[in-house]
Image (tube, grey):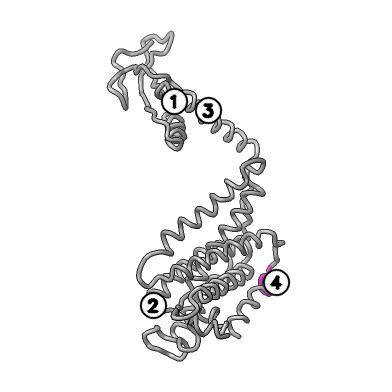
Amino acid sequence: MTDPNSTDATSPQAEPPLPVVRQSAVRGAIEAWSLVLASQGISHHIVERRVVEEGSAPLRFTQQFLLVVQPQHFRRAAVALARTDAEDAERARTPDAPPPDRGLALAPLVVCIALAVLFLVSGPRAGHSHWFTTGSADAAAIMKGAWYRAATGLTLHADAMHLLGNIAAMLIFLGAAGRWLGGGVAFTLTLLAGCLGNLSTAAFYGGAHNSVGASTATFAALGILGGLQARHRVKFGWWHRSNRIGRMWRAVAACLALFAMLGVGGPEVDVLAHATGLAWGLALGLAAAFLPPFKTWGNVVWGMAGAALVAW
């Protein structure tokens, strides 16, 4: 029995002549199903009505929420919702394995302090100090054999704002990679991917290109996280039995979205260096997912190897 004074949240009719694909007394459940249909591009409406409880005296009403679709879309909507129900049931039977967490790593903080100290020594790029003359990632010099500039260019910054932006991003991305792999492993892989990014950029330009900044390594750290997450989703996710490639690419797409927000735009932004750092980071992250876990001393060795490379 339906209350004659019932209201419709989305339609002027109390009982629209449309098929009901789902109904629930819980608004949240209906909204979740609505999102599923919206993602499939299926036109639908949520209708709210009050229903009299049977056998209640005095009369009591309960709210019901109906998800209605056009008749021609009913079968498609039902299939989409049934598929979602099956995925939810599979997820409940096979819960996700959380990614490894080795705790806070010291390496990101040490790296950021070292970058700040070196900036105090080298000064900004406008000062034209010896550090920039001999250490910037000059594409022409790199192609002539000064490959070390691919590493030293990561340690120099144009100005204080450039430095602070990279420090903030480094603490986030390298910090997350450090929790996953350990600080020393994450630092050395990030450094390696950043150097490869600068070398790739130099090879592309060949000359007439000169850049500085740790942002290439910062996006390399982001790429490493994406590679680790992609492998983890394939191996340990509830979907490991099917659609492996599709689920893996969602992690990669998340990296690309962050890259689009942070790594593109502005006349001084070296988009190619950011992109190559991200690409090499993704590749090394996928490879690092197969590494065995390293204990504290192992991470110390990895970190010292990376520090020695920069110092040299």
Cα distance, mark 2 to mark 4? Answer: 34 Å
Give the mark nearest the N terminus, 4 or 1: 1
* Lower position in the chain sequence, tag 2 or tag 1: 1
Q: Is residue 242 left or right of residue 258?
A: right
From the image, tell me which residue sits under label 2. Answer: 160
Proximity of marks 3 and 1: CB atoms separated by less than 8 Å: no
Image position, residue 248 (x, y; %): 59, 50
State the separation of the CA atoms marked 4 and 1. Answer: 61 Å
Q: Amino acid at mark 1?
A: His
Residue 304 versus residue 8 in the image, above or below: below
Is 122 covered by the magenta stretch? no
Q: Is residue 64 above or below residue 4?
A: below
Q: Which residue is at the front of the view, 119 or 67?
A: 67
Q: Residues within 10 Å of mark 3 (few under 14, many from 20)?
A: few
At 66% across and 62% down in the image, what residue appears? 287
Looking at the rendered image, the disc whose residue lies closer to the viewer, 4 or 1, is 1
Three-letter code, disc 2? Ala
| Mark 2 crowdedness (10 Å alpha carbons): few <14, some 14-19, many ≥20 | some
- For numbered disc 4, what is the local secondary structure? helix
> Residue 72 versus residue 82: which sits nearer the camera?
72
**x, y percent for residue 280:** 57, 66
Residue at image coords 51%, 53%: 253
Identify residue for label 1.
73
Q: Nearer the viewer, mark 2 or mark 4?
A: 2
